Amino acid sequence: MSGTIGAEQASAGADATQREIWQQPRLWREVETSSADAFLAPLLARPDLRIVLTGAGTSAFAGGLLAPELARHLHRRVDAIATTDLVSNPAGYLAEDVPTLLVSFARSGDSPESAAATELADQYLTDVHHLVVTCNADGLLAREHGPRASSHVLLMPAGSNDRSFAMTSSYTCMVLAAWSALVGGAPMETLALAGEGVLEARDADTRELATRGYQRIVYLGSGALQSLAKEGALKVLELTAGDIVAYADSALGFRHGPKAVLDSKTLAVVFVSDDPYTRRYDEDIALELRASLGVDHVRVVAGRRSERLGDEGVWYVDGLDGVPDAVLSLPFVLAAQMLALRFSLALGHTPDNPFPSGEVNRVVRGVTIYPVSV
C-alpha cells in the first residue's frame, strides 16, 4: 500500500513522522469540540470581544492561518500574535484593555512561553478568558487552566500529541478544532476523504521530487495561506536540519525583493486560495514562476480546477470547492509534510529526530521568563 512504513524508513528514523502524517485524516474524524460550546457562546455574543490567537512556531502559524478567516466569518477583530512576540513585548500587544478571548495553541503545553503568555494576559487585561487548544492533558498549560472558570481546555484526539520532532497531527487537529469550535460547519468526512486522496495521489510525486537535488524550496500563499506557506517552509527546515534553504512569502510580496532567492536548484510550491478574487494573484505568481523556473520545477496545490493553470504540475485536491481556505489548508499541508519527509530521507537525516545532538529540541529549552510590572 502506498504510504506504508517500510523497514528502510523505520531504520532511517522516520517511523513516527510518517505514521503521524498518514494518520491525520483518521484523527480529523475524531475531533470533537462540543465541550467548548457553553463556554464560548456568551463570549462570542459580545460585539466588543477581541480574539487573540497565540502559540509558538507551528502553533503560531495555526493562529496566522485562522485569523483572517475567522475575522471574515465572525465579523469581528481577530489577531494572531505569536507567544514569542507577546512574551517579549506584552505592553505593545496588550495595550488595549478590551474584553479578550486568548486562544492558546500548544502541542505539549510545556513550552516556557505558553504559560507566560496567558499569565501576561491576566496581568494586562481586566476581562480575559482563555481557550487552551492542546494535545497534552498533562501539560503545564492544561493543568493550570483546567480548574479555572475563566478558561476552557479543548483536548485533541488521542494520538495527536506527536512523538516525532515536527508538529504534523497536532497542527492540523488544533486548526480544525479551533475552526469547529469558533465557527462550526467543517465538513469532517469530506475533509478526511480529501486528505486521504492527497496522501495516496502525491506519495510517488514527493518521492521523485526529493531525488532531484534541489537546494532551495519556496512556498507561496495569499491571505490565510501565507501562514500555510510559512509552515511548509518550517517543516523543510526542521526535517532536513537546515540543509534545504526554505523561504515563504505571499504571492504579491514575493516580487518585492525576495524573488532573488530563485536559482536553478529551486523548487517552488504555490498554494492557491479558493476565494475567486485572491485566487487570481496566486495563479499569476504560479504562471510567472513557471516562466522563470520551468513548469517541471513548480508545483501548484489547488482545490478548484483552473483553465489558466491546466493540469501539468498541479496537485488538485478534489471535493472541497467552496470551503474556506482555513479548512482547505488541511489537506494542502499534507503535501508539504510529505515533501519535508522525503527530502529529509533523501539527504540521509532521521526525521523523527533530525537534531540528534540536541541543537534544536522538540520542546523549547533555555528560555528565561522575566517578571514584568504593569
Image (spheres, helix red, strand yellow):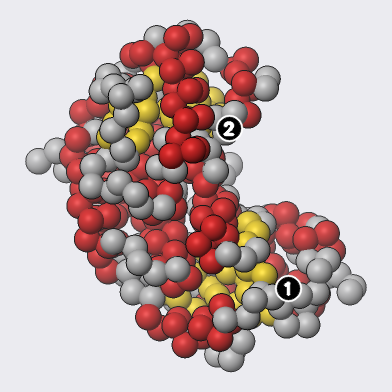
Instruction: Please report the residue visible at 52 percent of the width from the left and 81 percent of the height from the top.
Output: 40
Q: Position of residue 235 (x, y in %)?
A: 46, 40
Judge left or right: residue 43 versus residue 274: right
Q: Which of 373 and 200 is in front in this view?
A: 200
Element assignment for label 1: helix
Q: Where is residue 323 in the image (x, y as percent from the top left)?
A: 36, 52
Q: How far apart are marks 2 and 1 (CA)?
A: 30 Å
Locate residue 82, reporting x and y percent: 65, 55
Residue at the location (28% across, 48% down)?
Answer: 320
Compared to residue 81, the image places residue 138 above or below, namely below
Q: Horizontally, is 140 left or right of 214 in the view?
A: right
Q: Which of marks 2 and 1 is nearer the N terminus?
A: 1
Mark sitting on residue 152: none
Depicted 125 relative to depicted 189: above or below: below
Residue occupying the far left of the picture: 1
> What's the residue type where badge 2 is placed?
Asp
Q: In which quarter of the image is residue 316?
A: top left
Residue indicated by mark 1: 121
Q: How many labels does the image show?
A: 2
Quarter of image, res 45: bottom right
Q: What is the number of the mark on residue 249?
A: 2
Cβ atoms under marks 2 and 1 closer than 8 Å:
no
| The N terminus: image quadrant | top left
